[in-house]
């Protein structure tokens, strides 16, 4: 597997994005995932999904004095006891429809029966593997709702790399930990996506036909949970929107058409860094284009309101964000200014209203 796709897998595991590898049998999918898990100091628990019943994922009903509970199987309890883990679900598209339905909550929420793997304190990543339907024995089409719960990666084997490994030994996969502050890139990426979808609302939600074999396709969920969070995590690991890693991740999250259109849109943007604008609101260069100004206003507002434990810091960021918005045309920045003022932190004093005084007074916010 090439290094870019390994990097996408690395990003998804560390950011907690469910990821599905599609590839022919016997090409090392499982061994790569196990090796990467070890590199990231994660326990790897492999479950052959095609051999399981729906109750293995939805939980086994147990009658107790307080009522019926859905008891999780042993493999789920082992994951819940770990601090960091990877749940590898193999052969997912060989599961019958009922089992695929039971998998949906496991994949998206990390919940097995009444046991929440994440609420139990485990940082668990969900990785699945599947063979193409024409190859897999007894394979089913992947249910569209289940497919939309994954970032999809096409797994391709490299014969020459395999030959070198057979002669000299197969190397362990090297992977990187995600920086703890990676979510600081979410406001900017989210603003890009909001600006794009406002211009291209038809690409927000495109359900495939019922008879269509599908992998990734755009929905509000995949834009939010996979595209925004995935691109922010990739950015934190040094993969900007111009890199092959970010492009592969986006294609795997929302499909080819939506990904290509978004990347073309993003390349046309020359967005100031919202963090720098909040820190130095009098020094950033105001974008000249109205559409870029609108995206920038949304990014500044989201960044200024991002969760902070220190209320004094939050109040300071609110003020910096407000000053940055005041440098933009009021008709373009008003929606963001309204949002920012409505969420003013408790410790933040009311700033100079500048160009927004009349509009905010009419809205009853001052």
Image (cartoon, rainbow, N blue to C red):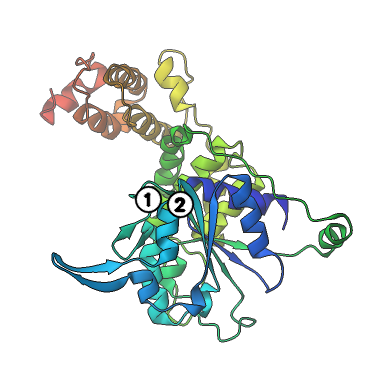
> Front-most of 69 and 326?
69
Residue 74 appears at what percent x and percent y? 41, 65
> In the structure shown, which secondary structural element does the residue marked by tag 2 occupy?
strand
Please say if 99 is above or below 354: below
Instruction: Indicate left or right for 243 with 45 as reference.
Output: right
Residue 183 appears at what percent x and percent y? 44, 36
Residue 283 appears at what percent x and percent y? 46, 13
**Comes first in the chain, label 1 or label 2:** 1
Instruction: Indicate left or right for 184 with 173 as reference.
Output: left
**Image quadrant assignment for residue 361:** top left
Please say if 236 is above or below 6: above
Please say if 238 is above or below 124: above
Q: Image quadrant for the C terminus? A: top left
* Residue 231 appearing in the image: yes
Please give the name of the residue rendered at 40% of the width and 16% of the height, measured from the top-left corner.
281
Q: Which residue is mark 2?
A: 124
Pointer 2 local density, CA inside 10 Å: few below 14, some 14–19, many at least 20: many
Q: Residue furthest front?
A: 65
Please give the name of the residue rendered at 26% of the width and 74% of the height, measured from the top-left corner.
61
Residues at discs 1 and 2 in contact (Cβ within 8 Å): yes
Residue 280 appears at what percent x and percent y? 43, 14
Pointer 1 local density, CA inside 10 Å: few below 14, some 14–19, many at least 20: some
> Front-most of 284 and 41?
41
Marks 1 and 2 sit apart, C-alpha to C-alpha, by 7 Å
Image disc number at residue 286: none
**Image quadrant assignment for residue 116:** bottom left
Image disc number at residue 118: 1
Instruction: Indicate left or right for 114 with 265 as reference.
Output: left
* Residue 8 appearing in the image: no
Please give the name of the residue rendered at 46% of the width and 68% of the height, measured from the top-left corner.
147
> In the structure shown, which secondary structural element does the residue marked by tag 1 occupy?
loop
């Amino acid at each position: 597997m090439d290094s870019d796709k390994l990097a996408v897998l690395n990003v998804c595991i560390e950011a907690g994005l469910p990821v599905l590898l599609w590839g022919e049998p016997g090409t090392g999918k499982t061994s790569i995932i196990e090796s990467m898990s070890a590199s990231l100091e994660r326990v790897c628990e492999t479950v052959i999904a095609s051999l399981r019943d729906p109750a293995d994922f939805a939980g086994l009903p147990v009658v107790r004095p307080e009522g019926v509970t859905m008891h999780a199987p042993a493999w789920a309890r082992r994951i819940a006891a770990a601090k960091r883990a990877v749940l590898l679900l193999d052969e997912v598209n060989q599961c019958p429809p009922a089992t695929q339905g039971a998998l949906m909550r496991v994949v998206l929420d990390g919940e097995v029966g009444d046991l929440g793997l994440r609420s139990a304190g485990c940082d668990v990543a969900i990785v699945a593997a599947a063979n193409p339907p024409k190859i897999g024995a007894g394979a089913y089409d992947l249910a569209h709702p289940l497919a939309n719960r994954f970032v999809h990666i096409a797994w391709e084997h490299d014969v020459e790399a395999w030959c070198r490994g057979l002669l000299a030994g197969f190397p362990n996969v090297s992977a990187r930990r995600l920086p703890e502050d990676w979510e600081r890139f979410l406001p900017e990426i989210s603003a890009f996506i909001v600006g794009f979808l406002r211009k291209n609302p038809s690409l927000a939600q495109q359900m495939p036909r019922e008879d269509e074999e599908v992998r990734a396709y755009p929905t509000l969920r995949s834009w939010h949970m996979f595209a925004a969070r995935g691109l922010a995590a990739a950015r934190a690991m040094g993969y900007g929107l111009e890199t092959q890693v970010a492009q592969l991740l986006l294609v795997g999250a929302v499909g080819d058409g939506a990904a290509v259109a978004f990347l073309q849109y993003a390349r046309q943007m020359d967005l100031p860094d919202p963090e720098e604008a909040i820190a130095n609101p009098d020094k950033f260069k105001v974008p000249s284009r109205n559409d870029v100004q609108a995206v920038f206003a949304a990014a500044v507002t989201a960044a200024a309101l991002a969760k902070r434990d220190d209320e004094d810091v939050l109040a300071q960021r609110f003020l910096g964000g407000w000053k940055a918005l005041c440098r933009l045309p009021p008709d373009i920045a008003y929606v963001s200014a309204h949002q920012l003022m409505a969420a003013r932190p408790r410790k933040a004093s009311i700033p100079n209203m500048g160009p927004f005084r009349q509009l905010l007074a009419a809205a009853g916010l001052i």
